[in-house]
Image (cartoon, rainbow, N blue to C red):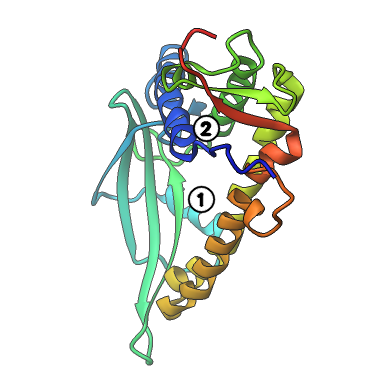
């Protein structure tokens, strides 16, 4: 067991945020440059820093048709026109159709769908670049960590870097593997929380349903980040580093 090593938990997460902001801004600028701010073909769903502004408006029939195609048999009784802006540059205009009703048990139930629209409020089907953007961000992180720096720009700023267990450079393969393994934790937490949350929001179930889900998600998260607390023979590192054969170390100087 490597009891003297530190996780550098907050530096890891702060580095991701600091790296994501300029990357997201560049992606937003490129999207607007090549496709426009609210393209009917390609757009972003609020990548990076985004602000949503919603208000009433007249719903076009094409929007109702699109909503019925997503969820048939629903008589929509509410609609909100929203403009989601990333960095105040790009624009993703949508209409949120909802059915809100209070049952005999005095519980309000809501179902809703989101329909992208053009500048005239008509339904469109753009291709959203967000997932490709996040994938490109992961690849960029892996390339930086496998470079001579062994760190992303934000990691250099915070004086941490990625190495293999042996202390040698991690390489592209290990860097990608640890990011893929780390993504599994996020997906697992989302899977645990999304089901109960949907039941609470859409069908009016008691919010107490979220309590056991939160406990399970928290237990999963802590077990992932501190597996050495459960098995003393494991190194002091999160599971994605253990599985990938990597670790984060602190350096005395940003020059690596």
Q: In which quadrant is the N terminus drawn?
A: top right
Crowd around label 2: few <14 · some 14–19 · many ≥20 (10 Å)? some
Q: What label does residue 158 carry, if any?
A: none
Is residue 35 rendered to the left or right of residue 227?
left
Element class at badge 1? helix
Among all residues in the image, which is located at the extreme bottom? 104
Q: Is residue 129 left or right of residue 31?
A: right
Measure the C-alpha gap from mark 2 to mark 1: 22 Å
Q: Is residue 31 above or below residue 53?
A: above
Which residue of the protein is positioned furthest toward the front in this rendering? 4
Nearest the eye: 19 or 96: 19
The answer, for residue 64, to whether it is visible in the render is yes
Tag 2 near tag 1, CB within 8 Å: no
Q: Residue furthest left?
A: 55
x, y percentage for residue 160? 51, 23
Residue at 43% x, 49% y is 63
Which SS class for mark 2? helix
Residue closer to the observer: 76 or 215: 215
Is 161 above or below relative to 206? Answer: above
Tag 1: Cα neighbours inside 10 Å, few (<14), some, or many (≥20)? some
Instruction: Residue under label 2, please give it.
Output: 130
- Residue 48 screen position, x and y as percent: 40, 31
Q: Quadrant of residue 249?
A: top right
Q: Quadrant of residue 111?
A: bottom left
Which residue corresponds to mark 1? 66
Residue drawn at x 36%, y 84% as measured from the top left: 107
Residue 231 position, x and y percent, is: 71, 57
Residue at 55% x, 9% y is 256
Image x and y of residue 105, in percent: 38, 91
Horizontal arrangement in the rendering, residue 127 relative to residue 102 (left or right): right
> Viewer-nearest of labels 2 and 1?
2
């Amino acid at each position: 067991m490597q009891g003297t090593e530190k996780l550098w938990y907050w530096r890891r997460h702060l580095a991701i945020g600091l790296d994501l902001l300029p990357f997201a801004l560049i992606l937003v600028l490129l999207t607007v440059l090549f496709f426009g701010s609210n393209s009917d073909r390609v757009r972003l769903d609020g990548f990076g820093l985004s602000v949503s502004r919603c208000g009433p408006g007249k719903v076009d029939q094409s929007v109702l048709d699109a909503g019925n195609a997503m969820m048939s048999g629903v008589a929509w009784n509410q609609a909100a026109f929203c403009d989601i802006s990333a960095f105040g540059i790009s624009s993703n205009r949508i209409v949120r159709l909802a059915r809100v009703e209070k049952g005999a048990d005095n519980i309000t139930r809501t179902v809703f769908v989101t329909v992208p629209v053009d500048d005239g409020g008509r339904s469109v089907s753009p291709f959203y670049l967000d997932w490709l953007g996040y994938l490109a961000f992961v690849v960029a992180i892996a390339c930086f960590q496998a470079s001579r720096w062994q760190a992303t720009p934000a990691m250099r700023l915070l004086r941490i870097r990625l190495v293999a267990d042996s202390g040698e450079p991690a390489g592209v393969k290990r860097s990608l593997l640890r990011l893929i393994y780390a993504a599994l934790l996020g997906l697992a937490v989302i899977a645990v929380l999304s089901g109960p949350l949907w039941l609470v929001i859409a069908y009016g179930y008691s919010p107490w349903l979220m309590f056991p889900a939160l406990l399970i998600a928290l237990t999963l998260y802590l077990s992932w980040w501190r597996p050495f607390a459960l098995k003393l023979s494991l190194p002091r590192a999160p599971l994605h580093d253990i599985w990938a054969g990597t670790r984060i170390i602190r350096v005395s100087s940003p020059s690596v």
